[in-house]
Image: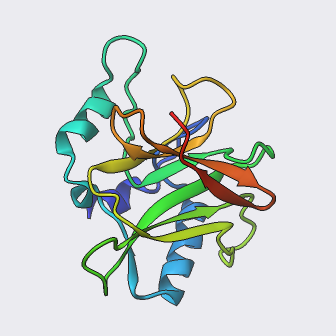
Amino acid sequence: MILAGLLFARSAWCGHTLSTQEHKVLSNWLSRHPRYRLAADKDCNCGADIEQMKAGDGGLWKPVRDYHPYVATGDFNSDGAEDFAVAVINRAKKDENFAVIVFNGPFESEEASPAFFKPGLDLTHQGLFYGPPRPKPYGLVVGHFESDNNVLLLPAGRSYKFDDSAD
């Protein structure tokens, strides 16, 4: 799978690929939750949107060459450590089978537990977004491409909460 190979690349400030250690954390979680699998680009049914994200718009929206709709990395909770979020799919469900998981760094072992887990979502034609050109402080956004009706995941203690007044 192409996405699995791309998960090992790393961006300097935020991105859409996982580091080797982040991949180990996710693999460990998935091995303990076999009904879930990592959502792949094809699950989005948004090929044109992915290509647009990778190309940019020539203006405010710069190219995000490593864009994958269901992976985001960055310091989501502003503690100085890189965190990551992924969308996974529950193989046992047909509808609303996506879940968003956020893991807070740093990752000293592969035994990390999620800081946030939200199942029962339909993320077809949607993605995870973090970083510019949105204003600082950046927030992790879940939603449709080019939409004003998205959800922001706000830090809430050691976890997160959905804020649907975002974007």
Q: How is the image coloured?
A: rainbow
In the rendered structure, the answer to whether residue 70 lies left or right of residue 81 reads left
The picture places residue 160, in percent across and down from the top left corner, at 68, 57
Residue at 49% x, 86% y is 31
Furthest-front residue in view?
A: 165
Looking at the image, which residue is at 81% across and 58% down? 157
Q: Is residue 156 above or below residue 56?
A: below
Above or below, 25 against 20 in this view is: below
Please count the marks in the image. 0
Percent from the top left, x then y, of residue 56? 33, 23
Q: In the displayed structure, does residue 21 sit left or right of residue 54?
A: right
Q: Is residue 163 left or right of residue 17?
A: right
The quarter of the displayed image where residue 115 is located: bottom right
- Residue at 50% from the left image edge and 33% from the top image edge: 167
Whole-percent x and y of residue 29?
55, 79
Q: Where the N terminus falls, by quadrant? A: bottom left
Residue in the image at 40% along x and 55% along y: 70
Res 112 → quadrant: bottom right
Name above or below for residue 155 compared with residue 102. Answer: above
Indicate the position of residue 18 as horizontal and vertical percent values. Answer: 51, 55
